[in-house]
Image (cartoon, rainbow, N blue to C red):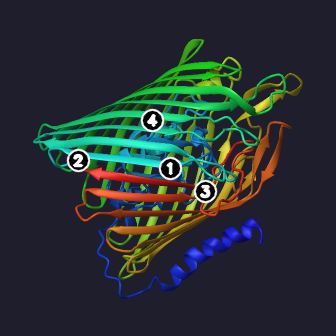
Amino acid sequence: MNKKCVGLYGLVLLCGASYAQQANDSLNVQQLDEVVVSDSRFQLKREHSGKTVIKITAEELERNKGRTVAEVINSKSGIEINGSRSVAGQNLGYFIRGGNNRQVLILIDGIQVNDPSQIANDFDIRLLDLNAIESIEIVKGAASTLYGNSAATAVINIATKAASTERVDLTVTSLIGTNATQDEETPPLANFNNAVSLSGTLDRFTYMASFANQFTNGLSAASGENTEQDAFSRFNADITLGYKFSDALDVKIYGGQTKLRTDIDGFPPPNFQFSDTDDRSTSEQYRFRLAPKFRYKNGSVNLNLGYTAIDRETVSDFPSTFESEGWVADIFNKYVFNENIYTIVGFNYQKNQTLFGDDVEYTNNDPYANLVYVSDVGINLNVGGRLNNHSEYGSQFIYNLNPSYTFDLGKGYGKVFGSYSTSFIAPSLFQLFDPTFGNADLEAEENRTIEAGIEVKMSKSFRFNALFFNRQEENTVLFTLIDPDNFISQYTNALDDATAQGIEFEMMGEVFDGLHFNANYTFTELKEGNRVRLPKHRANGTLRYDITNRTMIGINYQYVGSRLDTDFGIFEDVELDSFSLFDFNFSHRFKNDKVNVFANVTNLFNEDYEEIIGYTTRGRNFSLGLTLHL
């Protein structure tokens, strides 16, 4: 049986039996209506949202202890985070709706974050520690009206943990595990994670301080007959302070530092073939955020200020150093006219600066407005516009129209929705001004996204959604070999438009008391254009059984279809085989609620597969962890 058949059969096993029993009338699960925020910036019931927002709750993150942020997000519909199955130091590619990193915007506590020195101006989620995160919301499709440049295929809003309501609260988490390839008979202990957080509330004052570190070794970045090891290490230190001056005014201030070091392999001369080298990359990032909020009758004025400074260095046959800074100031007024009409009006300022021999920079100055209408008869509307004023590209008006209709199904609801959205993606500072590869004549990319779908919640335990999307790119930025004889490459705009379309399907619920399932499938087709590392077919499935209210076991399944990748040894695209992976996880919380133990087995059946040409992937590995809550 070929891998594709095995993959699709695995998904059927996970979701087929679950669907057959989802209508069990004996369920008496008491749950609050799910609330989503990121698609409107207001707390709306999921049934009133015109999107299928993915919400990863604190409970789900707790069940995924021992995994990385990338691995958790990678289990969701329509998302492929390439590199998350390779060595810990592997660069990550965010492939969503046929796009990649430059079209995905990351928010931390609602504030845009990025790295102006990166090729795609994106934020590296390897810098984040899962233990510090409270929840994650993912809005797929264009969201540039609310969030600006780069929010073309998805917005990933990461909320960090809030301070405990106790005076002093201490949490310690430690994990140890193996890190080996598929052919390693005795995998060594080579993966170590530790995190500690101290938080509390003293009258009007709140505090949260945390430290985390990760060290992973045992694998070579380059695959093949390699004996050298490429270690990865990350250190996080964060502190958040809050003060409530009155019922109307409070303020939060955050400061953090992350140090990341990874050994890498390279393309040494004279043959320029990817192989073992002693190359390394280091990155140090400093972050600061200030968020005061003033509430008044029916509304609030919010200010989000952010500053990031990044120093990165690569030591190789082609060394590089980057120093960059980014500033964000987002001020917006939220006003609720009544229970039906919600409005937001704001102004967003961003400045990115990087040293490429000389300091280069660009700024955005964007006024924006958005309106949400929730009617009493089921008709809902989310509409908005933004005037993107870019220092290099002038003014671009982008907009969003997102109607939906909700109807009652007794114990649940049905929802049909559609959207038409435009977005603007400016080339990065690297693509514009890098002395070797930059092109100051690049045009900005523009996207148009159409989406239509349905969501059905048949009971408190079962939900299903399906949607179709079509996205068109103009002026796609490509890395082009312009002089093959001398191996000279440069960033250029594609001559033709690119079009991606597809369908996404997700189903979740409870088969019977304690047995939960979640299954999703994504089909992505490129009508025009070319993409590497983007699978046409992708599926995920999860079965979780709560043995008691303190003990859980789970099986996670992932299928990734065949896809193209570029073989730089021959400068041609080749097709990589599909693969299927199963993971197992277990957790138990002791009666005093002070101790939680968890264990994971990844790549349970030790599948041999290739994620990126020439790079190592992980085989079957084990981890064991412990959380102490004092």
Where residue 418 sits in the image (x, y, percent)?
52, 62
At label 4, counting other C-alpha atoms closer than 10 Å, the crowd grade (few under 14, some 14-19, many 20 or more) is many
Q: Who is closer to the viewer here, 417 or 529?
A: 529
Residue identifier under label 2? 299
| Closer mark to the observer between disc 2 and disc 1 | 1
Find numbered disc 2 in the image and state the secondary structure of the residue it sits on.
strand
Q: Any mark on residue 620, and which?
A: 3
Residue 511: image x %, image y %? 45, 80
Q: Position of residue 60 (x, y in %)?
A: 40, 60
Q: Nearer the viewer, residue 141 or 19?
A: 19
Up the image or down, 91 lies above or below 49; here it is above
Instruction: Decide if residue 466 is in sight here.
Output: no
**Is 248 left, or right, of 347 in this rendering?**
left
User: Which residue is painted at 56% across and 48% down in the image?
Assistant: 153
Q: How far apart are marks 2 and 1 (CA)?
A: 49 Å
Estimate how packed mark 2 is, as few (under 14), some (14 to 19) or many (20 or more) residues with alpha carbons within 10 Å: some
Looking at marks 2 and 4 on the same chain, the residue that comes earlier in the sequence is marked by 4
- Packing grade of label 3 (10 A; few <14, some 14-19, many >=20) is many
- Mark 4 and mark 1 in contact? Answer it, CB < 8 Å: no
Q: What residue type is labelled 1?
A: Gly
Which quadrant of the figure contains the N terminus? bottom right
State how far apart marks 3 and 4 are (Cα): 34 Å
Q: In this view, does 224 lie above or below 511?
A: above
Q: Identify the residue under disc 1.
A: 177
Disc 2 versus disc 3: nearer the observer: 3
Residue depicted at 76% across the width and 33% down the height: 274
Q: Is residue 523 above or below residue 18?
A: above
Q: Mark 2: which amino acid?
A: Gly
Q: Where is residue 486 in the image (x, y as percent from the top left)?
A: 86, 22
